[in-house]
Image (cartoon, rainbow, N blue to C red):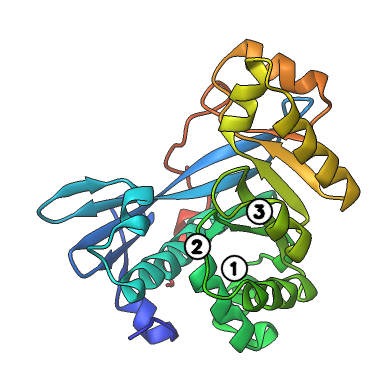
Amino acid sequence: MLLSTKNQFQQLITTNEDFVFTGSYKDLTLKSVYQPIFDADDQAVGIEALVRINHASDGIIRPDQFFNSPDFSLEDKINVERLSRVIHIRNFAHSQYSQLNLFLNVLPSAGEFFALEDIRTSLLCKRLFSLGLVPKQLIMEVVEHDTRDEECLKHAMAKLSKCGFQIAIDDFGIQASNHERVERIKPDIIKIDRSLMLSYMQDDKLPLLKGLELAKRINAKVVVEGIETAQQLQAMKQLEIDYYQGYFLAMPQPIHLVNIESNNAI
């Protein structure tokens, strides 16, 4: 059964000793960490929410391994994605970053379900408004996984966009995050995969430059991911890329809450 109602989520969400929201799904515990994204002036423009998954008996599971594992059903993956999004948004709303943008990963297979919803009356929109957030603060990042129906995914992202959400293509340059998906969805933001940046640094410049050309043609902003050295940052700034993300700039960390007293209503 796919999680879809407020009551279902309430049963799976708790707060820890620091009043931070966490999720529990079957044998999994879900926690949020966040990594800032910076502009060319080194000012944070938003944060990307990332889930940390801990299995009761197997310990930590990397998110990429979980979402690609044949050991978990598609239903489980969608439910973990949805529950993660719920705790990410709630923690963000009570943080020092709450006036910035929140980048949220979306599985293509899960994103397709947005095509079936009335977004304006959805649980997601209702919760945003109740937390004092607005849709344009959320950037829905379509991750690089394949989908059964790219046209359905396009329709789903178009509905989100029409309701004010921003759309991003994550990890552009690998797997299904390619030129065809970008041309089909026409996102607001393209996140360049680290592999293209590394190739550029090794004088294989064309793949990254083609990505920048594509972004310019569809009027999309660009985030370059995976910056780990000052040299890489300087090289990317010379290309006048819009936004920058990586361990050199900031590590993913649990969020600091600044409005704890109101963080008791799930």
In the rendered image, which residue does mark 2 sit on? 90
On the image, the x and y values in percent for residue 31 come to 35, 53
Indicate the secondary structure of the residue bearing disc 1. Answer: loop
Vertically, is 239 above or below 148?
above
In the rendered image, which residue does mark 1 sit on? 131
Vertically, is 136 above or below 230?
below
Q: Is residue 140 left or right of residue 253?
A: right
In the rendered image, which residue does mark 3 sit on? 169
The residue at 87%/53% (across/down) is 218
The amino acid type of the residue labelled 2 equals Arg
The residue at 9%/54% (across/down) is 57
The amino acid type of the residue labelled 3 equals Ile
| Circle 3 or circle 1, nearest the eye | 3
Q: Is residue 92 left or right of residue 201?
A: left
Q: Could one spot residue 97 in this view of the protein?
A: no
Q: Quadrant of the C terminus?
A: bottom left
Indicate the secondary structure of the residue bearing disc 3. Answer: strand
The amino acid type of the residue labelled 1 equals Leu
